[in-house]
Image (cartoon, rainbow, N blue to C red):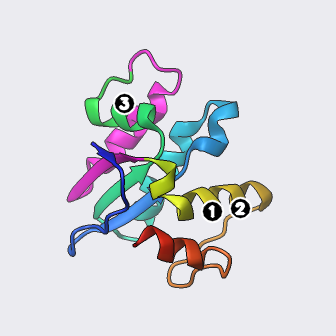
Amino acid sequence: MIQHQWRPPDPQNYKANFDAAVFKATNTAALACRRPVQFAWEIGLRRVTFEGNSAAVIQAITRGNSDFLPFGNIIDDIRNQVAGFQFSEFFHAYRICNTAADALAKKAKLCTGLQVWLEDIPADIAPLVSFDTH
């Protein structure tokens, strides 16, 4: 399913948004999806809606047709990992519906090392989060 507007997850679930556009040059868009799946597992989330702007990755995950894709092994890894979740779903979202994830992906290109924000939002991203939720 394609999301044309950001929607919050159901109350019992969490949501992990990702942006794969910055990885197109290296053909690693699937890695942009695998990392939030791994992170959700690492912090103990077991009911997660994953939403990202790579239609090809979302379709490969939801349809299970990864055999002939150059990143098929990553898709298989994602599918195996979410099999351990109580609930998971994947949606394609246009970038306009996912501006905070897009800005964070661009910010990540300039950063070295892992940066995690669990409860706080970087000051330059906070207005975008507010924009996405309206």
Q: Which residue is mark 1?
A: 104
Q: Quadrant of the C terminus?
A: bottom left
Query: At 63% across and 34% down in the image, what residue appears?
Result: 24
Q: Is residue 13 left or right of residue 23?
A: left
- Give the Cα distance between marks 2 and 3: 27 Å
Tags 2 and 3 touching, CB below 8 Å: no
Tags 1 and 2 touching, CB below 8 Å: yes
- Give the Cα distance between marks 3 and 1: 24 Å
Q: Which residue is mark 3?
A: 60
Front label number (2 vs 3): 2
SS type, badge 2: helix
SS type, badge 1: helix
Q: Which mark is residue 71?
A: none
- In the rendered picture of this protein, how many numbered marks are placed on residues? 3
Say if 62 sits above or below 46 in the image. Answer: above
Q: Which residue is mark 2?
A: 107
Query: At 60% across and 42% down in the image, what residue appears?
Result: 21
| 38 drawn magenta | no
Say if 28 sits above or below 37 in the image. Answer: above
Say if 134 sits above or below 26 in the image. Answer: below
Say if 109 sits above or below 60 in the image. Answer: below
- Which amino acid type is shown beneath numbered disc 3? Ala
Query: At 68% across and 76% down in the image, what residue appears?
Result: 124
- Give the Cα distance between marks 1 and 2: 5 Å
- Residue 104 placed where, x, y %? 62, 62
- Residue 48 placed where, x, y %? 30, 61
Query: At 47% across and 39% down in the image, what residue appears?
Result: 54
- Which amino acid type is shown beneath numbered disc 1? Leu
Compare residues 41 and 122 and report the one nearer the observer: 122
Query: From which residue to which does the magenta span run?
Result: 67-93
